Each structure stands twice: as C-alpha cells, then as structure tokens.
Amino acid sequence: LPSAVLLKDMKLMDVKLGQLGSWLAMRDFTPGGILGAIRRGYERYYNKYINVRKGGLGGISMLLAGYVVLSYTWSYSHIKHDRRRKYH
Amino acid sequence: MLSRLVLRAAPAALRALPPPAAVGVLHTTRSLHTSQQSLAPVPPLPEKGGEVRHGLIPEEFFQFLYPKTGVTGPYMLGTGLLLYILSKEIYVVNHETAAAACILTVIIYAIKKFGGDVAAFADKLNEEKMATALAMKNEAIQTLQTAIEQEKKEQWRVEGRSYLFDAKRNNIAMLLEANYRERLLMVYNEVKKRLDYQVAMQNLKRQKEQDHMIQWVERSVIQSITPQQQKESIAKCILDLKALSKSAQAAV
C-alpha cells in the first residue's frame, strides 16, 4: 500500500465515499477544533488569493459572490412570495 | 491552612492541563515539519494568486472535471444548474433581478475599462514601498560595511602601537640626556668659577705682595739715600757727564 495513513489523518479528497461517514465522525468538533478549522480555512484562502504580489479581482469577488448566495439563502423564505404561481 | 488549599487545588489544575497537546497532535500530523524551520529569511510572496475563471470560479474546478468531461463539462454543468434553479424557481425573478442586472452591467463595464489602470497604480505603490524598504536595507548594509572597514583600520592602527612607544621612549631618552648634559655643564661651570676665583685670589695676593715688596724696597732705598750720599752721587754724575762730553767732543 502506498500510503498506510490512518483514516482520521487523510485529507477529504482522499476519503472514499463509503468512508465519509466514519471520517466525519472522527473529526474534531470541540470549540477549539472548530476554531482551528476556521482559522486554517481562512489562512488557506488568504494565502492563496489575497496575500500575493499581484492579486487579482477573483480574490474578493469570490467572497462577495459567496456572501450574495448566503444572503439569498437566508432571505429565501421571504422571496418565496414573489414566485409566479397561483397559490403560494 | 492556606497551604492546604493550594495542595488541594494543585491536582485539579494538573488534571486540566493534558488535552490540548493531544488535539494539536491530531491536526498537525498532516504536514510533517521535517524541514529545518527558520523565520528568516522570509520566503518572498508568490507573484500571482490562484487562477480564477470569469472572476468567480477557481481554475481547480475546471481541472477537476476535465478528465471526465473535457473542456465544456463545467459550462454544461453551469448551464444545467442555471436552467434548473430558474425553472424550479429556486432563484426567483423579481424586481431585485432587474436591479442586479443593471448593477452588474455597470460594474463589469467599469472593471473591463479601468481594471488595468488601477492595477498599474497599485503596482506602482507597491513598488515604491518595496524600493524604500530595499533602500533602507542597502543603506544599513552599507553603513555596516563601512563600520567593518573602519574597525579593521583601527585594528591595523593598533599594531603600530609599538612604533609609537618606541618614538616616545626615544624622545624621553633624549630629554633625559639633554638634561643630564646641561647639568653636567652647569657643574663644570660652577667648579671652574670657583677654581678661577681661587686662582685669581692667589694671583692677586702674589701681585699685592710683589707690589708691596717693591714699594717697600724702594721706600727703604730712598730712605737710605741720605742727603750726603745724594750730593756725592750728583757730583759724581756731573763729573761723569763732563768726561763723557769731552770724549764726545773728541769723537766728533
């Protein structure tokens, strides 16, 4: 076997679909763990798209697009009433 | 009593310590820190950020779908998703859609027109910052270099200490010699003066004695010449003169 890595140490992309449930169960869900995950995600995004010499538009536009989608999701129950149907 | 409280609190505190280390181990085994870590020199920033297509979708997504669906895969997926959410009215077309369309048109037009200029301006600002920082660094290096050279020069100068001290020693020796000779001369002069004094005294004494003796002898001789003798001597002299005159007349 090329990588005899433990299940809990594998990256998400290397986890097979069948193992997804057990992999998720093994993740660290303590507040400290969640904070660490958020911090790591932030650092990855920041160092890839923003903390560069010639940063482009994509860095912030992706964040703004994500914000737009999220706010649409949160106000969907209110937007539902504008649908074109006879009975809402 | 207070010490007992501390002793009771200690095991509770010790029990609270262990967990964080295990949590840290679980998460950091992903990237093993095998290389030698050091904070300086800091690696330079990457030139360009991650590729983003159409300003919204990272390039990795297209690469992820390429092996299975080729180049048009993600676009077909996008079209299908768009039609699905429109037809099922998950995305509702209302007044906000019109507003969004107008705003997006204006924004995209502005970006396409002025994007290059803004980017160039930002790059210029960055360059200026880098240039000042680099200039400071170079200046610091330069001052340190000159300091090093001056230090080396000072060290070389220190080696010349021996010559300096030799010269000083020679100076002092000469001063001492000159002083010694001066004093020697003074001693000689003083001694000579005293000896001369003694010699002059002796000479004077002898001279005085001679004079005195001569005077005494003369005085006594003159005193001894009685008037009788004086007349006889004068008569004799006259006779002699006459005889001489006679002989002189005869000679002529």
Image (tube, rainbow, N blue to C red):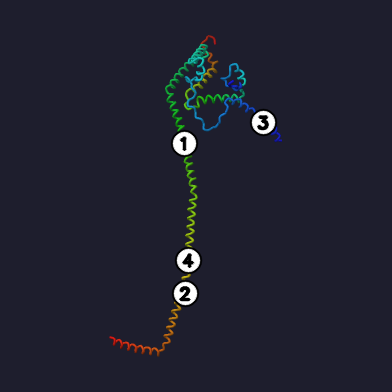
Q: Amino acid at mark 4?
A: Tyr
Given residues A77 and B227, the one toward you in this image is B227
Of mark 3 and mark 2, the one earlier in the sequence is 3
Q: As shown in the figure, which amino acid type bears the numbered disc 2? A: Gln
Q: Secondary structure at mark 3?
A: helix
Disc 1 versus disc 3: distance between alpha carbons? 52 Å
Rendered residue at 50%/50% (across/down): B162
Q: Which residue is mark 3?
A: B14
Instruction: Give the chain of mark 4.
Output: B
Identify whether B141 is placed above or below B57. Answer: below
Q: Nearer the viewer, residue B246 or B127?
A: B246
Q: Residues within 10 Å of mark 2 (few under 14, many from 20)?
A: few
Residue that label 2 marks: B202
> Residue B18 shows which numbered tag?
none
In the picture of the structure, the residue carrying the numbered disc 1 is B138
- Mark 1 and mark 4 lie on one chain; the one further toward the N terminus is 1
Q: Amino acid at mark 3?
A: Leu
How much space separates mark 2 and mark 1, taking CA atoms? 94 Å
**How far apart are the alpha carbons under marks 3 and 2?**
119 Å
**Numbered disc 1: what chain?**
B
